[in-house]
Image (tube, grey):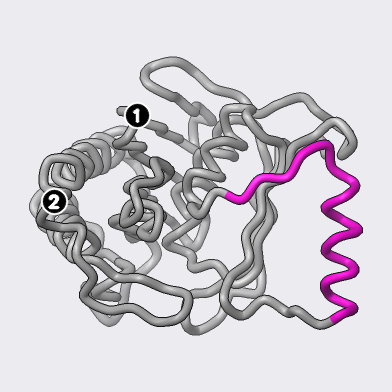
Amino acid sequence: MGIDNLDFEIEIAIKAAKSSGQLLVDSKSKLNNEISTDLRDTKLKADIASENLIKEYISQHSSHPILAEESGKSKDNLGDTYWIVDPLDGTANYNRGIPICCVSIGLVHKMKPVAGVIYDFNNNDLYVGNNIKKIAILNDKKIYVSKINKKKDGILITGLPHNTNYSDEALTNMIKDMKSWKKLRMLGSAAMASCYIACGKADLYKENGVYIWDIIAGAAIIESAGGLAEIFNIQDNHQADVIFSNSKI
């Protein structure tokens, strides 16, 4: 099957995202506790609780399997059409009270992001993208990417994952590129970065080594808003390199 009833599937994702977002707000005092940490990554009770809620709701209402950040595949063979879930993108921000984090749920068909729902629960902002109808919405209003076409006028969003190349040559090239933009931002949430590209707050987001659950929903929303989402170098561990843009820069 494919995606014949995409609007129905999107409504499922919306309800799951809003329910989990409400949980993350209402129960933060209980959920904001570390269950594991390393030098560059933090896992909270919040990640697990949010994912369990999302998976339970989707499984009850949709026939498509799930690939989720914390628990992996819901079945060995995901097939052509399946959900990709990040229950809390921007965990470190959530943990420290930085209000840039969200719930991210995407639907892919033959590895093409066809739908995306991202719930910025701190601001009660719901981003939705239908990549078949090419409609992107923020809180019931259509959104579009920016019209900026020159780096010197644009805003770049990026990040530095744990495996970033910090060699002299790599850093020199990175700084040279950063200096060509009007402004640079690092948000700590790939999903929120995608939303900012989709609604024209910034013009290009790029990062290497991000996980696909961080960016699949955002890719669908960006393309639905008229932008370009390039995902490449996908690894077996689900990491990938991305360039998301307004398609003009």
Magenta run includes residue 179: yes
What is the tally of numbered marks visible in this picture?
2
Query: In the displayed structure, does residue 204 sit left or right of residue 234?
Result: right
Would you identify the image quadrant in which residue 4 lies?
top left
Main SS, magenta region, reads helix
Q: Nearer the viewer, residue 240 or 184?
A: 184
> What residue is shown with label 1?
123
Who's the residue at 67% across and 35% down the image?
202
Who's the residue at 31% across and 56% down the image?
95
**Which structural element holds mark 2?**
helix
**Which structural element holds mark 1?**
loop
Residue 57, image x and y in percent? 12, 50
Who's the residue at 10% across and 56% down the image?
30
Of callouts 1 and 2, the N-terminal one:
2
Query: In the displayed structure, does residue 164 sit left or right of residue 237?
Result: right
Amino acid residing under circle 1? Asn
Screen quadrant of the C terminus: top right
Residue 164, image x and y in percent? 67, 76
Mark 1 Cα within 10 Å, few/some/many (few <14, many 20+)?
few
Region rendered in magenta: 168-186
> What residue is shown with label 2?
29
Screen quadrant of the N terminus: bottom left
Residue 235, image x and y in percent? 56, 80
Residue 56, image x and y in percent? 10, 57
Foreground mark, 1 or 2, reads: 2
Magenta run includes residue 64: no
Query: In the displayed structure, does residue 80 sit left or right of residue 16?
Result: right
Amino acid residing under circle 2? Ser
Q: Nearer the viewer, residue 179 or 230?
A: 179
- Residue 137's place in the image compared with 154, above or below, is above
Mark 2 Cα within 10 Å, few/some/many (few <14, many 20+)?
few
Distance from disc 1 to disc 2, alpha carbons, whole Å, reads: 18 Å
